[in-house]
Image: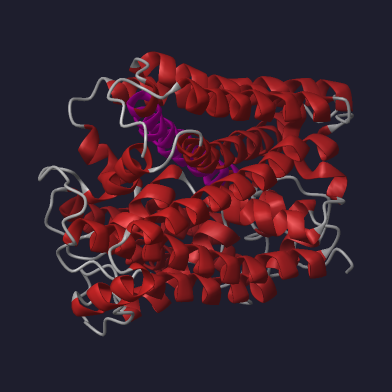
Amino acid sequence: MGTGHPTGLSLPDLAVVLVYLVGTTLVGAWFRKGQKDIQSYFVGDREVPWWLVLVSIVATETSTVTFLSVPGTAYNPRGGNLTFLQLALGYALGRLIIAWILLPGYFQGRFISAYQVLRQRFDTRVQRCASLLFLLTRTIADGLRLFLTALLLQQFTGWNMPLAILVMGGLTVLYTWLGGMQAVLWTDCIQFIIYMLGALLAGWILLASLPGGWSGFMRVGAEAGKFTLFNFSTDPATPYTLWAGVLGGAFFSMASHGADQIMVQRYLCAKNLSHARMALVASGVVVLLQFLLFLLIGVGLFVLAHSGAWELPADLRNDQVFGRFIVEKLPMGLVGLVIAAVLAAAMSTLSSSLNSSASAGLADFYQPLRPNRTEADYLAVSRWLTLLFGGAQIGVALLAWQIDSPRSIIDQVLSVAGLTTGMVLGLFLLGLMKRPVTSTAALIGMGCGFAVVMSVYIPGALGKPVVAWPWYAGIGALTTVLGALVISRPKTAGSQATAEPGIPGGRPE
């Protein structure tokens, strides 16, 4: 039924993939003519419709790891089920908190970086420290994501690893460099449609392949406990429990969507605060439904393998099963579409990372040091920064290729975001408090947060987890806040900037 070819794609499938890759590049070239200043390059002149912001939020947080690994969690013959959805409940709760607590502060002026808000509450040290942490984390984490995607591209096409990395990374850098945020948003929309269409078609063909069809899917899945949704365990080292999902997931979402430039930049593209809120809250519902689809595909893969109709190697990882199904079971032409969907999930995240890194680098570092340059100069620097961070991510991917065990890298990518974004969330929470906190105290609190998070992360990285990764962001945020409050002295003359306590809000709705 499928190509099943061990050395690469059939010509029709390869043609579909190449058309997709070239098409995204042309989108970037189309939007280049509309770039006149940094407001258009980074926030689309703040005239982007709310539904496009919504789609971009979802596409950005859906990476190749999500597309292939979430089905693997439900497929897992050793206890895999739907408990991953508990995290989606926490993600939705976190979005609601962001929408009414943090979001107003970003609409107080014409910001292009989330960390410019911290400068109003604290000083440039806090702003640049948070921004630098974001830039380092994004460069490393998304460089690793690029490597993981290149592994898949190599598997599907038969290309060597450096070529796969350079093709994926180079084309993503090119269309981001050309079209700026408008190109990123519209390619996010195209990529969202492609990867959702690919997942739906793959799920439909999977269901048609099952002995007994839908009834067989429900019967075997229920017998294996695959439809279990809630886990009430209180073990903090178990990632998919109700408590880790709702509480840990809420903090994780507040950090990743409320204090991370890659998401905040999307809100700043909206026409006003109300539109940004609408996009953010609705994205939580879309992500929950998307996760449900991926998990049900995983259950279907388990039922197919369990029926004996599909034999799998004993050493195949759970997150490789969906990719193998794509290559072996889908018809010619559709294989290329679904592989393009996998690449779309990766490129939407990588392009967003490049544009947000360039905006943070410009707003938090270059502009304050060179305040009197023209818009044309700033736009030129923005493009160079896009190339710089793109080259850095490609470099990380090439470096990861030299490591003997890529399997350990995959495990690390899944939890790296919570290590740093929680501490930055702690800074934003400090900024909302009425009690004044000095900038020095905030930075020391951030250091305390880093020390505590690393103390629970390292045992997990060594294979002996004490606390599961959904808790990392909450631990980092709360430790940062508590550390700063303990260290900070009562307000004295000259101890704080003249800004009133609390991050101000207010670009009019």
Instruction: Where is residue 498? Give x, y as percent.
Output: 75, 61
Q: Is 475 situated above or below 64? A: below
Q: Is 262 situated above or below 478? A: above
Report whether 408 appears left or right of 48. Answer: left
Q: Residue at x 61, y 20 (%)?
A: 387
Q: In the rendered image, which quarter is residue 275 located in?
A: bottom right
Q: In the rendered image, which quarter is residue 223 located in?
A: bottom left
Quarter of the image that includes the C terminus: bottom right
Instruction: Where is residue 177? Give x, y as percent.
Output: 69, 24
- Depth check, front residue: 368 or 310: 310
Residue 151 is covered by the magenta coloring: yes
Instruction: Where is residue 42? Give x, y as percent.
Output: 75, 39
Q: Residue at x 40, y 56 (%)?
A: 418
Residue 471 visible from this viewpoint: yes
- Depth check, front residue: 81 or 427: 81
Instruction: Where is residue 351? Give x, y as percent.
Output: 60, 35
State the extent of the magenta-drawn residues as a range.
Answer: 128-155
Magenta stretch, main secondary structure, is: helix
By what rule are the colours in the image chosen?
secondary structure
Residue 252 visible from this viewpoint: no
Q: Is 135 situated above or below 490? A: above
- Depth check, front residue: 419 or 345: 345
Q: Is 11 situated above or below 342? A: above
Q: Residue at x 70, y 52 (%)?
A: 266
Residue situated furthest bottom in the rendering: 232
Q: How many marks?
A: 0
Report whether 348 appears left or right of 250. Answer: right
Q: Residue at x 89, y 29 (%)?
A: 36
Report whether 32 appears left or right of 172. Answer: right
Residue 396 is covered by the magenta coloring: no
Quarter of the image that includes the N terminus: top left
